[in-house]
Image (cartoon, rainbow, N blue to C red):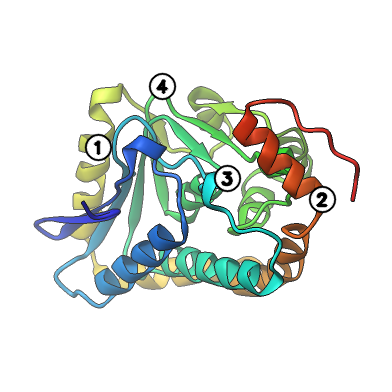
Amino acid sequence: MSSIDIERQGAVAVLTMNHPERRNALDLEMRRALLAALRELAEDDAVRALVLTGAGNAFCAGADVSRMGGRDLAGARERMKTLHAMVLALHGLDKPVVAAVRGAAVGIGFSLAMACDVAIASPSADFSQVFTRVGLAPDGGAIWFLARQLGMSRAKELVLSGRKLRAEEALALGLVARVVPEEQVLSDALALAAEYAAGPTLALAMAKQLFGAAVAPGLAAFLEQELLVGPQLAQTSDHAEGRAAFQDKRKPRFTGR
């Protein structure tokens, strides 16, 4: 079974993160597969719009904590570089991208939903940035997306608390475009993507470029800053304690080291 599935429906491609038994949590293999799929679709002129979703009852439950590496700096940098390339490939795709979100969109899953152009969610969807609970700072461009979409105060509250945003609150904050019944999420996302696919492809691509130029620094420059922070935090005692607490299903005991 492939960890990333591509299904073409006319001019729309459906890209599915397909590890439902892990709630589509991303390990390094899945990051590489998603990056390869995005690069393939970017070069496919027959694909004019994309839907990103997750198999089963979750969109993406974040990074696969059980498979995170230990305290090797070089390994942590390599994992983050792959993650950054994946987010840039999604956000920079010159075709409209619609996220169809059911269930958990946690950590990098939250970032992937925000990297899409439009998100449609079900009532079961919940969004959270839980990095601080495992002794890390957000990655995948999360702070870049949140600060621009919510403003600094609301973005900080979400990141520092690590709390969940339910679908209706995400709608009120403008993080999702609409909330629809569970059974309609994918079909509504497909219908919207098909509408975009029938539009003026070049004009839509250039409109996306203008949105990217409307904020500074750009996402790529911001991700360079993440690369200075994330791999160092991956070596800390607090991160080791956070990973252990997550796996033991207990509250972590952080020491600030």
Q: Where is residue 183 in the image (x, y as percent from the top left)?
A: 23, 24
Mark 3–mark 2 distance (CA, rounded to whole Å): 20 Å
Q: Residue at position x 14%, y 70% from top? A: 46
Left or right, 41 with respect to 117, comes to left
Please tell me the numbered disc located at residue 186. Answer: 1
Please tell me the numbered disc located at residue 123. Answer: 4
Mark 4: secondary structure: loop
Q: Which of marks 3 and 4 is in front?
A: 3
Mark 2–mark 1 distance (CA, rounded to whole Å): 41 Å
Please tell me the numbered disc located at residue 107. Answer: 3
Left or right, 41 with respect to 142, comes to left
- The amino acid type, in three-letter code, at marker 2 is Ser
Q: Where is residue 5 in the image (x, y as percent from the top left)?
A: 23, 54
- The amino acid type, in three-letter code, at marker 4 is Pro
- The amino acid type, in three-letter code, at marker 1 is Leu
Mark 3: secondary structure: loop
- Earlier along the polypeptide chain: callout 3 or callout 1? 3
Mark 4–mark 2 distance (CA, rounded to whole Å): 37 Å
Q: Where is residue 238 in the image (x, y as percent from the top left)?
A: 80, 46
